[in-house]
Image (tube, grey):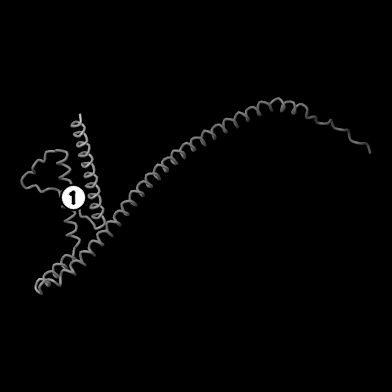
Amino acid sequence: AANPPARPALTRDAPSSQGSSHLPQQLKFTTSDSCDRIKDEFQLLQAQYHSLKLECDKLASEKSEMQRHYVMYYEMSYGLNIEMHKQAEIVKRLNGICAQVLPYLSQEHQQQVLGAIERAKQVTAPELNSIIRQQLQAHQLSQLQALALPLTPLPVGLQPPSLPAVSAGTGLLSLSALGSQAHLSKEDKNGHDGDTHQEDDGEKSD
């Protein structure tokens, strides 16, 4: 049998040449897109980094503020603890003095003193709040007088604003603050008087 005629071989030279002509443009286009995409991602990461840095700085500032408040409250609680122990020791010594003096009184006076001591021990929260309000009002009045601000009288029928209810813990903090402010003002006054005396002595020596 005769062999069938051979078919002409298909050559890929022409398509390959056309593909090779378009390949550099496609490669160039893909590289440019990749660079733009990398640039956009870098800018996005940089923006996120800037935002996280601002948030980190804010948290660091809040942490410093919280540490400052912690130190302040720790010093305040330590001072209150010392003051409570001091007052407890004073009460203990006063009770001892009362117990030593009580037998020298007559029977009638002993009963009166014992009743007065028991009544003095029964301090209620409303009484404590009233005492704290009075001390706060006196302190505010002294501050206004120190600033030399004129106190205008209230209109007829108008009551002065009442202070909010004070709890036991808040009352102790207020008393501690008043005591510390009074102590500081006393030290400032003593320092000012000392400076005045030094100036007077200097003038006399001249």
Question: What residue is rendered at 20% in x and 64% in y?
Answer: 94
**Dot 1: element:** helix
Residue 168 falls in image quadrant: bottom left
Quadrant where the C terminus lies?
A: top left
Residue at 83 percent of width and 31 percent of height? 9
Q: Residue 81: x and y, percent?
A: 30, 57
Above-or-below relation of 161 to 119: above
Identify the amino acid type marked 1. Leu
Q: Residue furthest left?
A: 156
Question: Residue furthest toward the front?
Answer: 205
**Nearer to me, 150 or 161:** 150
Q: Position of residue 30 (x, y in %)?
A: 63, 30
Residue found 17% across the figure and 67% down from its top: 98
| In the image, residue 103 above or below residue 125 | below
Left or right of 107, for residue 178: right
In-front residue for pair 111/19: 111
| Left or right of 88 on screen, residue 155 | left
Image quadrant in which the N terminus is located: top right
Point out residue 11 in the picture as x, y percentages from the top left corner: 80, 29
Residue placed most toward the observer, 85 or 140 = 85
- Which residue corresponds to mark 1? 136
Who's the residue at 57% across and 30% down the image? 36
